[in-house]
Image (cartoon, grey):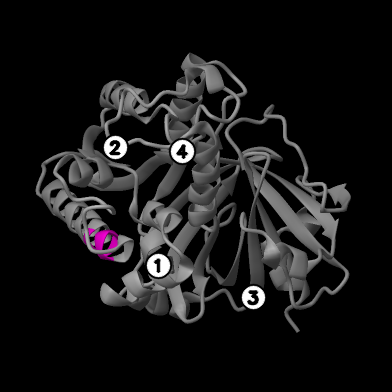
Amino acid sequence: MQITKIVITGGPCGGKSTALSKIHEEFEQMGYTVLFVPETATELISGGVAPWTCGTNLDYQKCHLKLQLEKETAFEKAASTMNKEKILIVCDRGALDSKAYMSQSEFDETLKSLSTNEIDLRDNYSAVFHLVTAAKGAEYAYTLSNNCARTETVEQARELDDKIISAWTGHPHLRIIDNSIDFDEKISHLIAEIASFLGEPEPYEIERKFLIEYPDLAYLDSLPNCQRLEIIQTYLKSPSGEETRVRQRGIDGNYVYFQTTKRKISDTRRIEIEKRLTKDEYLKLLSDVDTTKRQIRKTRYCLVYENQYFEIDIYPFWNDKAIMEIELRDEKQEIILPTSITVIKEVTDDDEYKNSTLAKNFLN
């Protein structure tokens, strides 16, 4: 059984309702059983529970997040009882959407009240897909009429869209679908992104990689659309032609764990299979380490720029350069490089700059 949980989020009037209907249609045809976790805010506000009816916004947000997590747990438990091969759980917004509606102190207090942390909440989903509000680039289509819980002006919708993107920045699989194309194409783009992530028809990873000058870390840390993470990557013994690694990913003592297997198809395309691990599973796999490669420790900055999701890796053995990469849905996709980053050269097809090569070259 394969159970995958994803989030469909975005700014107000981004197209979620249409998207959810299309997701059901398209992925049922691909053999998935599709389950939908309804939007918690709409349920609560429609029922009379809102920030303006509760004692404080913090009181409301604690209730909101608690209900969100309980609903997801119920759907996951129900999915585990179904005699189905592939189940796709689609959350109409996820736990980190709440962060966009709180101050940092309110968010910290909410996490404390639920005995959880931001890393666990954010990375509890396999992928996050953000539909940009119509208030950015399709203002003519922005409306309040199709959702009784929506009250934002165009300007407020834009600000909220930015906050939601910032809340999810740092997730390993965040994709942003903007309004540079018409609405039907926007929804088709979303379906293509989800299919690509799910590995339909095959689990390809398509990426481009750049060698860059050492970036201004203080500047990156100051950006609301950039999040810093610490990664420890360990290579395991693998058959010829394959690469298997385990990864600890997080910050401030809060970590999640993954196992990834890759097989090269072309210079930009690889088959990639990734699965989440428990801490015990991760520690057990470390006993099968490939001793010909060192453990890679790096600091990763996840940066949203022009609705693209870049990952900048800082290595302890370099003080003059770094690696920046971006994952694509197809090999012809156009990218816009961040103006704050100085690119030395593209190294997509250069094995010298693969993590597995760096793990060998800096073994001692």
For label 3, the SS is strand
Q: Amino acid at mark 3?
A: Arg
CA–CA distance between discs 1 and 4? 19 Å
Up the image or down, 49 lies above or below 296; here it is: above
Q: Provide the residue span drawn in magenta.
A: 59-63
Pinpoint residue 52: horizontal percent, then vertical percent. Answer: 27, 52
The kind of secondary structure element at disc 4 is loop
- The 10 Å Cα crowd at callout 3, few under 14, some 14 to 19, many 20 or more, is some
Q: Residues within 10 Å of mark 1 (few under 14, many from 20)?
A: many
Q: Are marks 1 and 3 in contact (CB under 8 Å)?
A: no
Q: Counting residues from the N terminus, which is met first, the one under dot 2 or under dot 3?
A: 2
**Comparing marks 1 and 3, which lies closer to the viewer?**
1
Closest to the observer: 321 or 71?
A: 71
- Mark on residue 11? 4
Disc 2 to disc 3, C-alpha distance: 45 Å
Residue with the mark numbered 2: 149
**Viewer-side label of 2, 3:** 2
